Image (spheres, grey):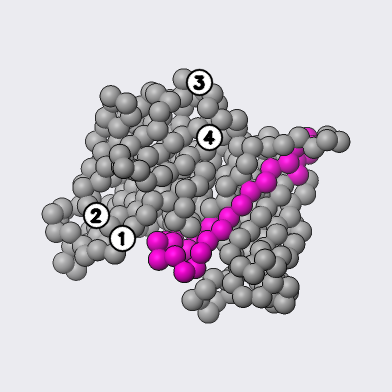
Amino acid sequence: MQRILAALILGAAAAACGSDQRAEPIPQAPTTGTSDENASELESNETEPSTAFPDGPPPLEVSQADARHSLDAFSYCWTIDDEGICADGEPAKPLPSLGGDEPLTLDFAIDGWHFVASMLDPCDPSTVVVERSDAGWLVDVAGPVGTTDLMLFGRGPEGDAAYAVETVRQVETAPATMRGWLSPFNLPGHDETFDLWLGLDGPDELLDIERASLTVAGADGGTFEIDLEPNDAGECFASFRIPASIADDVDAAIGGLRWTYGIELALADGSVFEGTASFDPTDPDSAFIEDGLAVRFAPADTAADG
């Protein structure tokens, strides 16, 4: 299966058992339980597994204006009454297509599930935001005129499932941007301390980065700034990493839990991207938090001296 971004996610989680995801970063279904441009997450509720669909996940209903598609999962792992089945595949082409600029509405037949949405193509310059509303779950895909192949990855008490749909923008709804995911130093409730990992997806012209910095802010207002060094790069992908030992310096500077992360990227053309990632460890709706945090980037600003 192609790598979803990323998390995703945050970066995001391997979509359905055994699927091949690119790179070490963060599984493609990560994040913080809040709307996000990279791999936005829907809320979930604790619930018992349903027995209404014993043979696998039900279709995901996706609609836009008057158009509607019933999507079958192309990869999934499903468990009912301790009996499990997994299927690993690729989205069948051509994908079902929706051609408007309005948000997509998602309907799923089982309660207790949450979803992330992300681009199948890491070079896609689009962004995606998922929000819950009275009308259902809304997926807003924005970017230049063109086509986006969208991955919708869900997880719930019965297992996980991946779906895909094509969206076609008729007008430009946002400038091209990058997407990011951040693995924190450590996380509340976890004994293990992780290296920091910042991964970025997007068009190559946005990944010509001359300087990258990270500011970590604690709940009490203390901050600590770190310069990031390039770790790896490839087509439409770049990453930065610093050792986990820096966590002691962060603790000394701000103390307690790390709640907010600010990222500044200065590009070779003089433009500057600013991104944020945050979570509330007391929020029971924060899911996939062990995998990483999605980074939401604001549109690029051009430096005055650029």
* Residue identified by numbered label 2: 111
Q: Residue at x 47, y 69 (%)?
A: 282
Mark 1 or mark 4: whose residue is earlier in sequence: 1
Q: Which mark is residue 45?
A: 1
Looking at the image, is mark 1 or mark 4 nearer the viewer? 1
Looking at the image, is mark 2 or mark 4 nearer the viewer? 2
Looking at the image, is mark 3 or mark 4 nearer the viewer? 3
Tell me the element at label 4.
Answer: loop
* Residue identified by numbered label 4: 126
Q: Is residue 152 left or right of residue 246?
A: left
Disc 3 marks a residue whose amino acid type is Val
Disc 2 marks a residue whose amino acid type is Asp
Q: Residues under labels 3 and 2: Cα distance?
A: 35 Å
Tell me the element at label 1.
Answer: loop
Q: Which mark is residue 171?
A: 3
Q: Residues under labels 2 and 4: Cα distance?
A: 29 Å
Tell me the element at label 3.
Answer: loop
Tell me the element at label 2.
Answer: loop
Vertical order, 182 against 302 (above or below): below
Q: Are marks 1 and 2 in contact (CB under 8 Å)?
A: yes
Q: Residue at x 63, y 58 (%)?
A: 261
